[in-house]
Image (cartoon, rainbow, N blue to C red):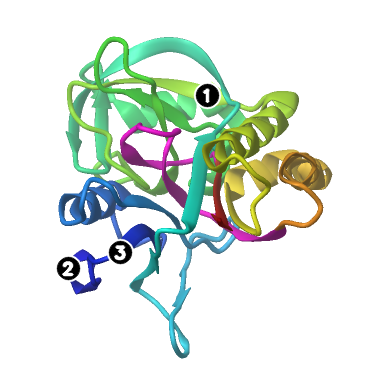
Amino acid sequence: LAQSLDKEGLAHVFVLSDGLKINGSELVKGLVKHLPDSVSVTGGLSGDGALFRETYVLWDGEPEKNMVAVLGFYGEQLRVGYASFGGWDPFGPERLITRSRGNVLYEFDGKSALALYKKYLGDHAKGLPSTGLLFPLSVRIKTGDRGVVRTILSVNEEDQSMTFAGDVPEGAYARLMKANFDRLIDGAVEAAKSSLAMIGTSPEFAILISCVGRKLILKQRIEEELEGVRDVLGEQTILSGFYSYGEISPFSKDAHCELHNQTMTITAFSEV
């Protein structure tokens, strides 16, 4: 996909992907590897609420499953701002991932990760994988790293594994997280402020990708997330977006592009 784009004048790539069948972390790595360093990448994984049955991407025709689509933005006058913030609070001890394969997690500290997850979730465990949206993981690769949030997509009772939207590598450290209503809304506002700061002016258009887990938590308060972004970007900015199973963006300017879960990720566009 990256190689199919004309590189001359390419400023930004926006990607949309199936949310269940594709490892978002590997998708991001593949795109970034084959694009110039000067080209930023944002986007998201499609979702279907808390059903986890099938997701679609619409591209030049009928909606399709197992689809990845990219859109290239070109021009010296184009300015793109982006940011990704969460607002979840960690709880419980940090645990070492001792057995995993890609985005499939088997063991924490040499013990069944699924069993431990169920223990922490209590009655919520009956509703897995959808209730896993309420208790994501913060995954930190090494000391000093900012943790990336990972959300469960499915569970396998036979081998006691959990499949996440992105990689959960062996040797990384993981910690459970829970919701804080005000901090979730504040996270959306911070994403708006950071994306606005990158372009220095109120954007003409902004794409908002918010994880479906945030919607399930905030419920009636979900409008506050949108209102907070609107207050920052301005009334004239056209807003669009969707609730996702994963968000793709650097945390902020000059950071590496990564797959995130449970964030509000904003891509703002302006021409000068």
What residue is shown with label 2? 3
On residue 177, which mark appears?
A: 1
In the rendered structure, does residue 260 fall within the stretch colored magenta? yes
Q: Secondary structure at mark 1?
A: strand
Decide whether the magenta segment is chiefly helix, strand or loop. strand
What percent of the width, then of the height, locates residue 226?
75, 47
Q: Earlier in the sequence, mark 1 or mark 3?
A: 3
Q: Nearer the viewer, mark 1 or mark 3?
A: 3
What residue is at 48 percent from the left and 11 percent from the top? 92
| Rendered view: 212 above or below 51 | above
What residue is shown with label 3? 9
> In terms of depth relative to the viewer, which is nearer, 263 or 164?
263
Q: Secondary structure at mark 3?
A: loop
Q: Nearer the viewer, mark 2 or mark 3?
A: 3
In the rendered structure, does residue 151 fall within the stretch colored magenta? no
Residue 239 location, quadrant: bottom right
Q: Please tell me how many numbered marks the rendered image carries.
A: 3
| Rendered view: 34 above or below 175 | below
Residue 16 location, quadrant: bottom left
Q: Amino acid at mark 2?
A: Gln
Is 201 on the left or on the right of 9, as rendered? right
| Rendered view: 134 above or below 110 | below
Q: Secondary structure at mark 2?
A: helix
Do labels 1 and 2 touch, CB within 8 Å? no
